[in-house]
Amino acid sequence: MISSSHALLALCAGGAALAAPGLGGMLFGARGVESGEKRTEALWTSETPSIEPCPRLEGERRVDLAIVGGGCTGLAGAYYAKKLRPDWSVAVLESHRLGSGASSRNSGAVYARYWGLDDEEMPRRGFERLARFIEEEEIECDFRPSPTLELFASRRSAKKAETCLEPGSRWVPAEDLRRGAHSDYYAGAAQLPGYYTVHPGKLVAGHVRATRRLEVDLYENSPVVQVKKGNPAVLVTPGGIIRADHVLLATNAYTPRLGFLKAAMMPVHQYTFATRKLSDSEISGYGLDRWPLRFERSILPVTNFLTPSGHLCIRIVLGYASFNSCVWKDIEGARYLAKRMFEQRYPWIADIGLEQGWQGVTGHTLRVREISGPVMGANIQSAVAFNGLGIMPGHNTAYLSVCRITGHPDQDLRYMLGKGAQIPIPGEFYRSMLLKPAMKILTPDQSARLS
Ligand SMILES: Cc1cc2nc3c(=O)[nH]c(=O)nc-3n(C[C@H](O)[C@H](O)[C@H](O)COP(=O)(O)OP(=O)(O)OC[C@H]3O[C@@H](n4cnc5c(N)ncnc54)[C@H](O)[C@@H]3O)c2cc1C
């Protein structure tokens, strides 16, 4: 169920492809990140003490392991590499600021399961590893269990869900949602066990501190524009180059821009809108403390969450921008759609007002699994892609990737899916031509604005 709806999401998201930004002038060098990408700050970052800036890579360096991408996956990879091989020199190259990608833009939901995988033991070990990391590194990031609702908008889907509740879940009828959550939009919900939430900005800052402590070399504003195969491999940035025995790509949705995995993954854009900070009485009055995390399992998922500081947020899926662009041009359209979807569900939001919004991208595969393994020669590997819940799987994939790179045995290495195990994604032409009608049906307002 999860797999198929997310596979469809990845396909349908392609329908927004006619919002094609021009290719000219977008490439930074031969390959790499888009020069026009300006990342506005997410609420989480504005609530986190600023991370001390890191230098730009200048000149030439030689290292044992170079990691491209300084989000939580890349930073966790650097952390575990130094833990497993303290004698190795490890460098992280980040094109913008550390953690400024999806890692600081997400909804902060953490779950001890992998979407697209039935096995429960391996994700449980991954979850425990992340929890141990937070505890041992004393990262204060509001990591805690969170009462969570899975909401159903149609009576048909609610009826079906009620008859096949997972163990430990409890059914919440529409009437209880009307009274307890002040919403008559939904036909019912399942209260799910096992969800945690975390403050993404504080988690990113904790990752940076932990890697600094282990003397990982961190570089910001150092986009890798070219990866040259060989032993050592060579990473080219505008300011300098790094020769590395091993390379790990932790570039998530931006990976196709770097020239890798174009046929296995694609970036999908999301937009999050936050209210002003709510008072304690508003929070309890609207039942937000009872169910701080709520999501709709639909083809285009919608998530609502209350931040630890008291902002209520909605996160919506926008779609795919042509040529694997990670820039969403129509931010006004995104705000409009998010506001409308927010008010549809919770009409009282109109009186409260919306304050801050931010865009983000996630890397999707049709197999609903991350891609980890060699991408170019045996010494250039990837640990990328998200399909629903990426905070824990990203951390776990980073650990397992460096296990493989350093030769450290782990029972869970067998779960790593390389690019060969992924389902091929249709090329740009088909994404544009075949999927646009589907997108129009799913998000009529937005498609109208985009065409
Ligand atoms: C709106 C939104 C909501 C989400 N909600 C949740 C949630 O509730 N729960 C959950 O578990 N997950 C969620 N996710 C997914 C989660 O945030 C990601 O799976 C996770 O942060 C991935 O981390 P990462 O380090 O792999 O990627 P990123 O944080 O995207 O890091 C990749 C980094 O690579 C850098 N980079 C790219 N190209 C280059 C280059 N050429 N050279 C150098 N650096 C480069 C980028 O600048 C970026 O910083 C959400 C994501 C979004 C966008």
Image (spheres, grey):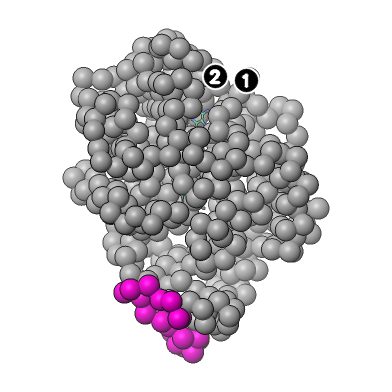
Q: Is mark 2 within 8 Å of ligand 1?
A: no
Percent across and percent down for residue 181 are 46, 81
Q: Disc 1 marks which residue?
A: 29
Above-or-below relation of 210 to 311: above
Q: Residue at x 75, y 34 (%)?
A: 22
Horizontal side of 236 relative to 326 (left or right) equals: left
Range shown magenta? 162-182
Q: Return the residue at label 2.
A: 226
CB under 8 Å between discs 2 and 1: yes
Labels 2, 1: front one: 2
* Residue 171 highlighted magenta (yes or no): yes
Mark before the other along the chain sequence, 2 or 1 = 1
Q: Which mark is residue 302?
A: none
Image coordinates for residue 92, horizontal then vertical, percent: 39, 27
Residue 272 shows in this picture: no
Q: Nearer the viewer, residue 40 or 394?
A: 394
Residue 247 visible, this angle: yes
Q: Is residue 277 magenta?
A: no
Towards the viewer: 385 or 308: 385
What amino acid is found at the position of numbered circle 2 in the picture?
Gln
Residue at (60, 55) in percent of width and height: 9
Location of residue 101 with respect to 260 vertically, above or below: below
Percent from the top left, x then y, of residue 342? 58, 69
Report helix, strand or loop for mark 1: loop
Q: On the image, which quarter does residue 416 sit in?
A: top left
Question: SS at mark 2?
Answer: strand
